[in-house]
Amino acid sequence: MSLPFCDPKGCVAAGCDVVVCRGAGVASNEELFARSAAVIPGGVNSSIRAFKAVGGTPYVVSRAQGASLWDVEGKHYLDLVQSYGAIIAGHAHPRVVEALTKAATDGTSYGAPTPREMKLAEEIRSRVPSCERVRLMNSGSEATTTAVRLARGATGRDRIVKFAGCFHGAVDALLAAGGSGVATLGLPGTAGVPAAAVSETLVAPFNVVPTLDDSVAAVIVEPLPGNMGLVEPSAGFLAGLRAECDRVGALLIFDEVISGFRVSRGGYQSVCGVVPDITCFGKVIGGGLPIGAIGGRRDVMENLSPLGTVFHAGTLAGNPLATAAGLAALSLLDDGAYEFLAQQARRLGEGLRQAFAAAGVPVVVPVVGTLVGLHLATTPATNFDEAKTTDEAMFGRFFHGMLNEGVALAPGAYEVLFPGLAHTDAVIDQIIDAAGRAALRAARSA
């Protein structure tokens, strides 16, 4: 597609919202990324998008539909990123688009209560019984921040226990030994977080129940970690955390930003049978728009202002567009949808195993519910140290091989794959075929 000429100021002045162009031809990914880098640190607004872990220049997305996306050069990709799990129904799903269109015509933000935020909170509560009360906010990071503040306020204690490799967003107190982006960048934490911010944070190895004392306000955990690859909790681990928290009067926080409404109707807690005191949500509940939420026991949640003394507020919290999109997305997720998602995850996982086996590359492909991991090693990982044995160099070669084949993976060896409702049998077959060729080339170039 050819676009009319515009310059950096002219396109903004004209109200143009299409991709940037040069002359009569479409600008390249390299040109647009360079232009972005001149105004955005690193050229990206989320660090992993810069491709630092895998090398090369990022593709710049122009549009997406279903399981597909297209970059500004017009190249088509089958997408397994799906906005890191936020897009479960497929890009631009008609029901979500219709809901957004209707909501936008009613206004985009009010700074006042709305029926949609009430309905979304009711929908979350109906699916997750532990969420007797729900508070909406703007992101998963805000959800985990608020959960930690709430736990401290409700218990009158300061100490938080987290687990190495579990990533809980951009929260100063929790940016220690995180997975995903932090692990990908090879950082144990981050500059800019003072020692005082993590002085009351204890980091334990995943799958080991720590011994707590009465200084601990809460234990926060991804019950199904999706930021150090895909690592299942061992038998008894989550139940052990519940028992240990109960023993000392601490709260148990499940970070289900990834797993919530992704792996099952009731999140991973409905799979494992362990009931947390507070649950953090994001991604799926916004239908692709920015959102976050926490839910939990009524007596704990009512410590939040205006009922209690733990402050939380946000101008855009419960945004009418995000709640409309979230309600539309959740309406698509019935039992049949989860059966289909699990089936496609199994097919993808087995196809990837066969692709790497044929190439002679060691691989473990965990599949849990609707999520698929990729661990390039000989044995499954049970904690962060074991997750870091994955062959990052091999992953980088495979990643670029898949891009060349027209399949988009997350640009980091510690992310999971997100097949969604738009990933039909034909789409999965194409991805598996591409993986066979990409794995073989990656092995030959080692």
Image: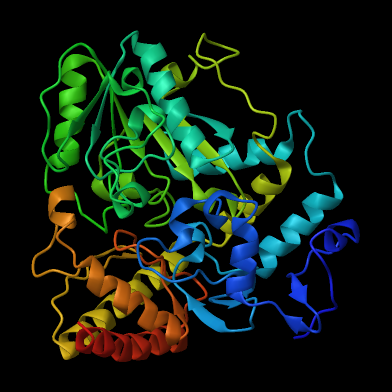
Is residue 171 left or right of 222 when viewed as pictured? right
Q: Quadrant of the N terminus?
A: bottom right
Occupied quadrant, residue 130: top left
Residue at point 59% right, 74% down? 29
In the displayed structure, 98 sits above or below 157; it is below
In this rendering, the answer to whether 294 lies above or below 72 is: above
Quarter of the image for residue 323 reads top right
Nearest to the observer: residue 301 or residue 395: 395
Toward the right, the furthest residue is 14
Q: Does residue 285 show up?
A: yes
Q: Tell me residue 325's x, y (percent).
A: 65, 53
Q: Name the quarter where the C terminus is drawn.
A: bottom left
User: Picture quarter containing residue 359?
Assistant: bottom left
Residue 298: x and y in percent read 45, 21
Q: How many marks?
A: 0
**Viewer-closest of 423 and 343:** 423
Comparing 434 with 328, the one in front is 434
Say whether residue 322 is left or right of residue 76: right
Q: Is residue 305 left or right of residue 170?
A: right
Residue 277 visible here: no
Q: Residue at x 34, y 8 (%)?
A: 156
What colour scheme has been applied to the protein in the rendered image?
rainbow
| Picture residue at 43% right of the left edge, 71% below the top | 56
Residue 309, given in percent of the width and then of the height, sits at 51, 8
Locate residue 376, reporting x and y percent: 19, 70
